[in-house]
């Protein structure tokens, strides 16, 4: 990794505090930061280098996955941090910033490799990119890269406009669009799962899959983000980006002889093949919900409309489930069910691949399909559940589990993986413009249907799994969501009363 400078816009913000500094710190401990390394933080607040460094230290103490190290180690980490007050609209401030960047580069002997990290509100993306170009910050002898947080536009048109502006300052291969779901360790292992296990590759291509389920349920509500969330809803906050990225990552086929990172070029093909929905008919395929008051883990949870800052007559979606079809030779006829929502029973992010049933009945469990289960959060594991004959010559089949590897405790988090990749110039796990554009294009009829109330807004009580219509979406095809109601072990009285439930239970007790 070449020595480089990170120029961080939004250095006093929440994301920097919770994610970026702890990630950089852990990268530092793991020897994953460039040497030498320099970071210049920018914000509106009147901080000094010292108060900035003290804030970085505080954020490490509060949010790092590792205990803070000894004071000397912390000092040598935060010693690389400098702060500048910057008004994003003032040309003069960028000129001074350039002087400071160049001075630090000279002092530390760092070539002019600059990573501009925009951890700011989306309304600032375009002005900052243009100022980077205009000020000469972006015309160096080394490399330049732009790391940009979501949201990338708020609809197709605004995303296109944003991309066009950014491309005046940065080429596509210099733009690293963060979708932190792509940094999740289990998502990053999807590609190698097919490459390292040829059997999986065959399963993926050989019409063995009955359906794929992608869930990102959250128990938190709108939190302090009412002003933002009430304008975007689950569809823009989670579905257009994270959920469709998970779908692409799951649906790509990666031949074993292809090099690492080949999946990225194929993701666009998946999006191109995604069957478009029609605004008028999508109510059979898309379920929209909003939470009402309820109880989560014994605590009262207010309804969405009563949350501070939410319009009392808000028609915003806090839940969305959808059935998607990919019209290519690999996936034609295999439904992908996606769902995500807030104030649901528990936090669980997972991908379940349900295989076709056995062609011959195999005892009473013939209806219990084999499953590949990828737990992304809060647990991290990959498990294959197969059916095997019980010991002896029993006619009874029972589920067995093959553990394909859990993530080790305290492994690098998404932001560590992503920042490391950006510093190394590897864009595999970032969203390419083609994917972003196609995702916005695909959700446009849904956005229109929601805006025009073509799809009913279904209430669901906080602490449930969302509107019943989301279950009916699968039931209509003869399927059901896996692992919903069995997560709380205390809830279960009789573990073996039902074979099908037994499978779910076996899965959860082992993790
Ligand atoms: C963010 C959304 O992108 O992802 C949040 O804006 C959501 O609303 C979060 O809570 C979920 O991320 P994770 O990693 O906790 O599943």
Image: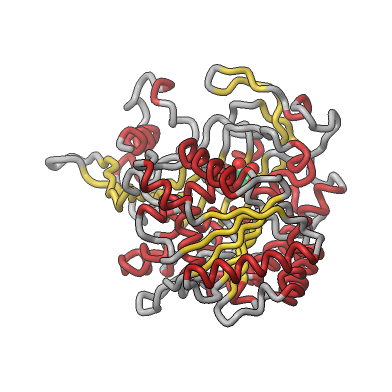
Q: For residue 67, which quarter of the picture?
A: top left
Please say if 2 is above or below 61: below
Please tell me which residue is depicted at 33% across the width and 43% down the height of the picture: 409
Give the quarter the ligand 1 occupies.
top right
Q: Is residue 327 visible?
A: no
Q: What colouring method underlies this structural image?
A: secondary structure
Depth check, front residue: 213 or 210: 213
Q: Position of residue 164 (x, y in %)?
A: 76, 73
Q: Position of residue 418 (x, y in %)?
A: 50, 60
Please say if 307 is above or below 252: above
Q: For residue 493, which quarter of the picture?
A: top left
Depth check, front residue: 361 or 357: 357
Q: State the count of labels.
A: 0
Quadrant placement of the N terminus:
bottom left
Quadrant placement of the C terminus:
top left
Please tell me which residue is depicted at 55% across the width and 79% down the height of the picture: 142
- 389 with respect to 248 (left or right): left
- 337 with respect to 310 (left or right): left
Q: For residue 131, which quarter of the picture?
A: bottom right
- 250 with respect to 119 (left or right): left
Q: Position of residue 242 (x, y in %)?
A: 59, 54
Please tell me which residue is depicted at 50% across the width and 53% down the height of the picture: 415
Q: Which residue of the protein is positioned furthest toward the left in this rendering?
A: 392
Q: Which residue of the protein is positioned furthest toward the bottom in this rendering?
A: 141
Please say if 184 is above or below 489: below
Q: Position of residue 182 (x, y in %)?
A: 52, 58
Q: Is residue 206 visible?
A: yes
């Amino acid at each position: 990794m070449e020595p480089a400078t990170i120029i961080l816009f939004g250095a006093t913000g929440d994301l920097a505090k919770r994610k970026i500094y702890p990630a950089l710190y852990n990268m530092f401990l793991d020897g994953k930061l460039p040497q030498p390394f320099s970071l210049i933080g920018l914000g509106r607040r009147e901080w000094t280098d010292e108060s900035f460094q003290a804030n970085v230290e505080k954020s490490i103490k509060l949010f790092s996955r590792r205990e803070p190290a000894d004071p000397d180690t912390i000092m040598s980490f935060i010693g690389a941090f400098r702060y500048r007050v910057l008004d994003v609209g003032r040309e003069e401030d960028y000129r001074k910033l350039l002087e400071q960047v160049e001075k630090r580069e000279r002092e530390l002997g760092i070539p002019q490799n600059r990573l501009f990290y925009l951890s700011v509100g989306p309304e600032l993306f375009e002005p900052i990119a243009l100022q980077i170009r205009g000020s000469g910050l972006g015309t160096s002898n080394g490399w330049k890269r732009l790391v940009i947080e979501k949201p990338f536009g708020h609809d197709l048109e605004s995303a296109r406009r944003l991309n066009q502006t950014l491309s005046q300052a940065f080429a596509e291969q210099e733009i690293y669009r963060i979708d932190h779901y792509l940094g999740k360790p289990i998502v990053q292992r999807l590609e190698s799962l097919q490459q390292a296990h040829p059997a999986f590759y065959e399963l993926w291509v050989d019409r063995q899959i009955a359906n794929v389920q992608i869930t990102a349920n959250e128990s938190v509500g709108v939190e302090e983000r009412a002003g933002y969330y009430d304008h975007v809803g689950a569809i823009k906050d989670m579905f257009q980006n994270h959920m469709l990225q998970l779908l692409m990552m799951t649906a790509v086929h990666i031949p074993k002889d292809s090099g690492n990172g080949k999946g990225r070029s194929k993701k666009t093909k998946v999006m191109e093949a995604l069957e478009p929905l029609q605004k008028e008919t999508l109510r059979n395929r898309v379920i929209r919900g909003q939470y009402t008051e309820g109880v989560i883990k014994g605590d009262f949870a207010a309804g969405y409309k009563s949350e501070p800052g939410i319009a009392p007559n808000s028609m915003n979606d806090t839940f969305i489930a959808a059935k998607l079809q990919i019209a290519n030779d690999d996936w034609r006829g295999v439904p992908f069910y996606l769902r995500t929502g807030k104030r649901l029973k528990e936090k669980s992010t997972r991908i379940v691949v349900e295989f076709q049933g056995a062609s011959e009945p195999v005892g009473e469990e013939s209806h219990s399909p084999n499953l590949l289960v990828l737990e992304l959060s809060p647990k991290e594991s990959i498990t294959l559940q197969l059916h095997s004959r019980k010991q002896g010559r029993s006619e009874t089949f029972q589920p067995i589990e093959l553990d394909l590897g859990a993530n080790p405790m305290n492994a690098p988090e998404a932001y560590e993986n992503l920042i490391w990749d950006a510093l190394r110039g590897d864009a595999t796990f970032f969203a390419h413009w083609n994917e972003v554009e196609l995702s916005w294009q695909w959700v446009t009829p849904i956005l229109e249907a929601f805006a025009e109330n073509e799809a009913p807004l279904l209430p669901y009580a906080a602490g449930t799994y969302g509107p019943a219509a989301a279950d009916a979406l699968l039931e209509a095809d003869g399927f059901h969501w896996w692992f919903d109601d069995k997560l709380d072990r205390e809830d279960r009285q009789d573990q073996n009363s039902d074979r099908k439930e037994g499978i779910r239970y076996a899965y959860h007790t082992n993790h």
